[in-house]
Amino acid sequence: MKDRPVRHDHPESHLITRIGWLRAAVLGANDGIISTASLVMGVASAASSSHDALVAGVAGLTAGAMAMAAGEYVSVSSQADTEHADLAREARELDTDTMHEREELAHIYVARGVEPGLAREVSRQLMAKDALGAHARDELGISDTTAARPVQAALASAATFSVGAAAPLALLVLSPATLLLPVVAAGSLVFLALLGMVGAKAGGADVIKPMIRVTFWGALAMAMTTGIGAIFGKVL
């Protein structure tokens, strides 16, 4: 009985390809909602006017978006610099001692369960096609999917922070002055729960734990800043 030919027209989409922008996007939106809602509630609980709370919230949105963009760019750039340094060192080693590098790659495959002779042949063929790419992927763990992208991370964080921060500001504008705190708190927790669900869905994970996790920490942050605002509002 002849083996059936293997089809190569089946499209595959792996969720790991989203990890770079998804992490930055979820972090940015989460930080935008929590920090802005907490700031607004802290100012409002200090017996300040709705206008004061709105001004503080807008300032927080602007400063937070810039801080998120700068922070992501700097941190991811540091990761990219490390990756480039490792690749440069690996390229030098390939130029000076190809045989050792071929054996090193073969040992990696043997450790993963490949028979030694086959591992050496795989190492030889992969290095004949793209030696640096093979070592980057299998020795250093660097690939196009997981490579650091500073600009992408910075833009995603700034944009999603702004969107997240706009949510509690919209609640502030729409809520009556007497209900400002409960409306902003409840609405922000709903937004956080939705964010946890969307992030989990986009990453292919279960939605319950992310929703609980993000709403818990958001509620804790808002409660603490509201309490601090109320205390200092009475003292000062």
Image: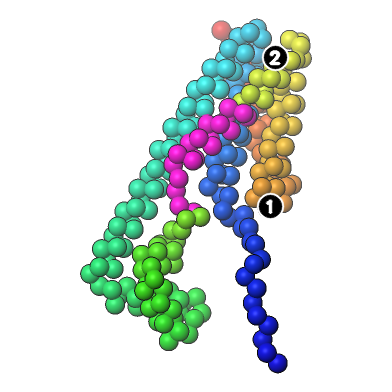
Task: From the viewer's perspective, tell me whether residue 15 is left or right of residue 149.
Answer: right
| Residues packed near mark 1 inside 10 Å, few (<14), some (14 to 19) or many (20 plus) | some
Specify the quadrant that holds the C terminus: top right
The answer to whether mark 1 and mark 2 are in CB contact below 8 A is no
Q: Nearer the viewer, residue 9 or 24?
A: 9
Range covered by the magenta-colored residues: 146-164
- In the image, taking residue 1 as reference, residue 105 lies left or right, namely left
Residue where numbered disc 2 is placed: 173
In the rendered view, would you say 232 is above or below 18? above
Q: Residue furthest bottom?
A: 1
Q: Residues within 10 Å of mark 2 (few under 14, many from 20)?
A: some
Quadrant of the drawing holding the N terminus = bottom right
Label 1: which residue?
205
Look at the numbered disc 1 and give the secondary structure of its residue.
loop
Q: Answer with left or right where residue 91 lies relative to residue 190.
A: left
Residue located 62% across and 70% down the image: 8
Q: Decide if residue 85 is on the left or right side of residue 65.
A: left
Q: Is residue 54 above or below residue 85?
A: above
Element type where label 2 sits in the image: helix
Residue that appears at 58% across and 50% down: 18
Residue lying at 28% horizontally and 73% vertically, measured from the top left: 98
Nearer to me, 170 or 222: 170
Q: Position of residue 196 (x, y in %)?
A: 68, 41
